[in-house]
């Protein structure tokens, strides 16, 4: 006796349909989190553009914290890629959780960079 019923026909669609929907869900997850990671990236780009001219207008153009601007620019991209690599091969929920932790770390780092910029800014005369 076999485990299959005698009238069952295996047409192969049972295995590809879940794989297809899983791939679609994964791609949608990547896109949603890419949009969420884009906001800290936009903040980093806007800080990189606006902060040096703002410091120059205050007369402290030499005190631009370039290392903080670089962190603000690179952190969202690197943490998103790291979360994608760490989540690779996992189910959908753990992958989403890893991406969410990376997003939280990105936003925490962006807020810390803002605070550090205020700390390292020289006093205005």
Image (spheres, grey):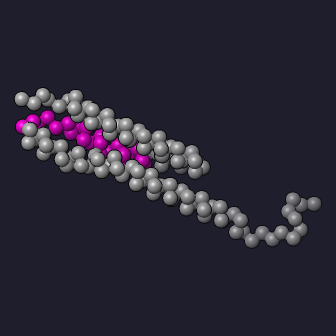
- Work out which residue is located at the far right of the displayed protein and give it: 1
Residue drawn 22% across the image and 32% down it = 118
- 34 with respect to 73 (left or right): right
Residue drawn 54% across the image and 47% down it = 95
77 to 120, vertically: above or below: below
- Work out which residue is located at the far front of the displayed protein and give it: 125
6 to 42, vertically: above or below: below
**Number of numbered discs present?**
0
Q: Is residue 28 magenta?
A: no
Closest to the observer, 121 or 9:
121
Residue 70 found in image quarter: top left
Q: Give x and y (percent) for residue 65.
A: 20, 36
Magenta portion: prevailing SS class = helix
Q: Which residues are magenta?
A: 59-81
Closest to the observer, 91 or 122:
122
For the N terminus, the image quarter is: bottom right
- 107 with respect to 51 (left or right): right
Q: Give x and y (percent) for residue 15.
A: 69, 63
For the C terminus, the image quarter is: top left
- 98 with respect to 9 (left or right): left
Residue drawn 85% across the image and 62% down it = 4
- 33 with respect to 44 (left or right): right
3 to 102, vertically: above or below: below
Q: Give x and y (percent) for residue 11.
A: 74, 71
Residue drawn 30% across the image and 40% down it = 71
Q: Is residue 72 magenta?
A: yes
Q: Give x and y (percent) for residue 35.
A: 40, 54
């Amino acid at each position: 006796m076999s485990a299959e019923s005698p009238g069952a026909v295996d047409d192969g669609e049972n295995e590809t349909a879940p794989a297809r929907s899983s791939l679609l869900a994964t791609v949608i997850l990547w896109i949603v989190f890419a949009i969420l990671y884009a906001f800290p990236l936009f903040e980093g780009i806007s800080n990189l553009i606006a902060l040096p001219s703002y410091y120059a207008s205050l007369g402290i153009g030499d005190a631009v914290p370039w290392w903080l601007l670089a962190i603000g620019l690179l952190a969202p991209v690197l943490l998103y890629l790291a979360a994608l690599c760490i989540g690779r091969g996992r189910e959908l929920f753990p992958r989403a959780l890893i991406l969410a932790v990376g997003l939280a770390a990105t936003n925490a780092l962006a807020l810390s960079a803002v605070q550090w910029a205020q700390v390292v800014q020289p006093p205005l005369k």
